[in-house]
């Protein structure tokens, strides 16, 4: 089983779309995934209604009771995922819609991470989404080389955006006080970053994807 972590805070409309699209698009591999959600807030709020609506799909739901922030929330939900002793963890933010199933790529992603000691994580954000063209830690332009049919590897920085990451790497990164600090810790490990050449997760702020639901 591969844990899928989600962090959310008072964005029920976004969360509903994210969860609905994820479960619809990835229904054929849901039995291989364990979804862990950290809700920053208390039970009884509108977000909790969304959680209860989809509760049959969750392995565990954590309530922080307050907004502890993105970095602290990321660290907390990752610590929970690490309790399962997985080899890899998928992270999904609450404003990324599932546009394409992970199913055709999951074995390829896992196989690369298993074999490549120099790669710590692989980005799953759609290749059609615009992202920074340079590494935020080194300042160098991002360059990739193709290593498998659907994965390129290069010098991109770490991110809280959708990724699949080695658990041993997560253990060395958390806990963190900011995404920038996570980037710095990852960079200090001397690891490269992969990018899946697919459209699995699309940011809500980008072009609407086929699984958008009003």
Image (spheres, rainbow, N blue to C red):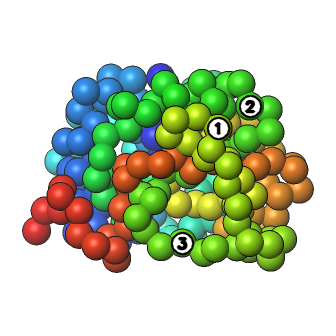
For mark 1, what is the residue?
147
Q: Residue at x 51, y 47 (%)?
A: 196
For mark 2, what is the residue?
116
Which tag, 2 or 3, sits closer to the chain's start? Answer: 2
Q: How many neighbours does mark 1 have within 10 angstroms: few (below 14), some (14-19), or many (20 or more)?
A: few
Q: Position of residue 117 (x, y in %)?
A: 79, 32
- Rounded to the nearest angstrom, the CA distance separating label 2 from label 3 is 24 Å
Secondary structure category for the residue under label 1: loop
Confirm or deny contact between disc 2 and disc 1 (CB under 8 A): yes
- Rounded to the nearest angstrom, the CA distance separating label 2 from label 1 is 10 Å
Q: Residue at x 80, y 76 (%)?
A: 139
Query: Where 30 sits versus 141, above or below?
Result: above
Which tag, 3 or 1, sits closer to the chain's start? Answer: 3
Return the residue found at the far left. Answer: 214
Q: Residue at x 87, y 49 (%)?
A: 189
Q: Does residue 111 appear to the left or right of 9 in the view shown?
A: right
Q: Does residue 134 appear to the left or right of 197 in the view shown?
A: right
Which tag, 2 or 1, sits closer to the chain's start? Answer: 2
Q: Position of residue 122 (x, y in %)?
A: 60, 46
For mark 3, what is the residue?
131
The image quadrant of residue 55 is: top left
Specify whether residue 76 is in view: no
Confirm or deny contact between disc 3 and disc 1 (CB under 8 A): no
Query: Where 134 sits versus 170, above or below?
Result: below
Confirm or deny contact between disc 2 and disc 3 (CB under 8 A): no
Q: Position of residue 51 (x, y in %)?
A: 26, 51
Q: Residue at x 35, y 31 (%)?
A: 103
Quadrant where the image shows the C terminus: bottom left
């Amino acid at each position: 089983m591969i844990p899928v972590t989600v962090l959310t805070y008072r964005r029920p409309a976004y969360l509903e779309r994210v969860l609905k699209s994820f479960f619809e698009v990835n229904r054929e591999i849901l039995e291989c995934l364990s979804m862990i959600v950290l809700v920053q807030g208390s039970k009884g709020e509108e977000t909790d209604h969304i959680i209860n609506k989809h509760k049959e799909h969750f392995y565990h739901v954590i309530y922080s009771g307050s907004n502890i922030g993105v970095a602290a929330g990321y660290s907390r939900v990752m610590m929970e995922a690490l309790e399962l002793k997985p080899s890899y963890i998928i992270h999904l933010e609450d404003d990324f819609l599932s546009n394409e199933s992970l199913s055709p790529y999951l074995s390829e992603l896992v196989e690369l991470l298993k074999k490549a000691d120099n790669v710590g994580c692989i980005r799953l954000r759609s290749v059609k989404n615009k992202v920074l063209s340079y590494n935020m830690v080194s300042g160098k332009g991002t360059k990739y080389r193709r290593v498998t049919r659907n994965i390129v590897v290069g010098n991109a920085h770490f991110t809280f955006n959708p990724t699949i990451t080695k658990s041993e790497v997560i253990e060395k990164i958390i806990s963190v006080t900011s995404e920038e600090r996570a980037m710095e810790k990852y960079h200090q490990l001397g690891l490269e970053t992969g990018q899946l050449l697919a459209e699995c997760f699309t940011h809500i702020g980008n072009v609407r994807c086929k699984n958008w639901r009003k």
